[in-house]
Amino acid sequence: MKIIIVWFLFVLSACVANAQSTTDIMVGGGFDLFKTNNRKLFDKGQVNLEANYFVARHFAVGAGVELWTANPNSFVMGMRWYADDNFFGRLRGLIGANDVSVGAGWSKPLLTNWRFEALADFYFHGDFGLRAGVAYIIN
């Protein structure tokens, strides 16, 4: 009886697993909670919208936009490498701001296809930012 219960729980967990797989598309957005070039509270804002395509289980390429209230908006191209299902590193080029960012992030599954993401980015122009957002995985 115990083996049947364990087998049932294993099959159930495999059906509702939140991991991404090859050819999945993840669409998301986020906003900056903190950035070193902000001098006053609510002085300026930064929001991003992006889509990532999983070429392999732990590697995704993506594109999107960065919308800034005080700087030129940027088209973004980049990639993510997932060390596991929750932690990833990323590299992005910001066309329009003429900058590159390298960062790391953490994602927490909320529902089957929804994730909460927290990210830290270092911009080559010398700024550092912390970002939060949500993403939806299209299977």
Image: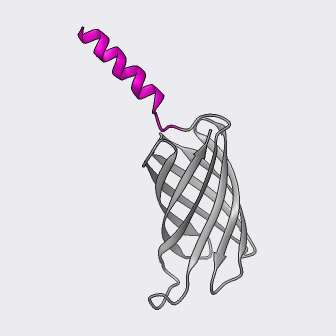
Is 97 located above or below residue 85 in the figure?
Answer: below
* 6 lies above or below 51: above
Image-quadrant location for residue 66: bottom right
Residue 71 placed where, x, y %? 67, 84
Residue 88 belongs to magenta span: no
Give the prevailing secondary structure in the magenta stretch: helix
Residue sitting at x 69%, y 53%: 62
Q: Estimate the x, y position of residue 17 in percent, counting from the top left.
A: 46, 33
Query: Which residue sits at x=70%, y=62%?
Result: 64
Q: Position of residue 9 (x, y in %)?
A: 34, 22
Q: Nearer the viewer, residue 17 or 81?
A: 17
Q: In this orientation, which residue lies closer to the viewer: 86 or 103?
A: 86
- Left or right: 8, with 17 as reference point: left
Q: Position of residue 38 (x, y in %)?
A: 50, 85
Q: Residue at x 50, y 56 (%)?
A: 104
Q: Which residues are magenta?
A: 1-19
At 73% across and 74% down in the image, what residue appears? 98
Image quadrant occupied by the N terminus? top left
Quadrant that contains the C terminus: top right
- Is residue 105 or residue 67 the one in the foreground? 67
